[in-house]
Amino acid sequence: MRDEAEIREQYEFLAEQLESEEMRHESIRQLFTHYKRALGWVLEEEHI
């Protein structure tokens, strides 16, 4: 199991990637969006 710092770091990385100009292809954007959402849920569950 990954620690919170590692998960948060990946979440921040994905957020930056979604904002970049290179992420124009729609299917890639959707994939990253779903992964980012899943990481967000993991972070929320850790704090509940």
Image: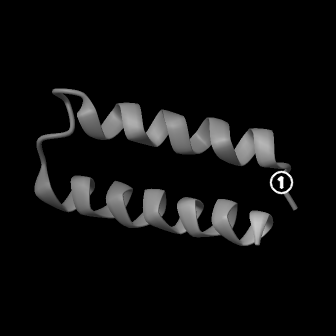
The 10 Å Cα crowd at callout 1, few under 14, some 14 to 19, many 20 or more, is: few
Q: Who's the residue at 87% across and 62% down the image?
A: 1
Residue type at mark 1: give it. Answer: Arg
Q: Who's the residue at 38% across and 31% down the image?
A: 16
Indicate how the structure is coloured in the image: one colour
Q: Is residue 41 above or below residue 13?
A: below
| Left/right of residue 22 with respect to residue 42 in the rendered view | left
Q: Is residue 33 above or below residue 9?
A: below
Q: How many marks?
A: 1
Give the image quarter of residue 22.
top left
Task: Provide residue 10's location: percent of width, then percent of height.
Answer: 60, 41
Q: Is residue 46 above or below residue 23?
A: below
| Left/right of residue 33 with respect to residue 43 in the rendered view | left
| Left/right of residue 9 with respect to residue 31 in the rendered view | right
Toward the top, the furthest residue is 21
Location of the C terminus by quadrant is bottom right
Give the image quarter of residue 27.
bottom left
Q: Who's the residue at 71% across and 72% down the image?
A: 45
Toward the front, the furthest residue is 48
Return the residue at label 1. Answer: 2
Give the image quarter of residue 6.
top right
Task: Provide residue 11's location: percent of width, then percent of height.
Answer: 54, 45
**Tag 1, which secondary structure?**
loop
Q: Who's the residue at 85% across and 49% down the image?
A: 3
Q: Is residue 2 above or below residue 23?
A: below
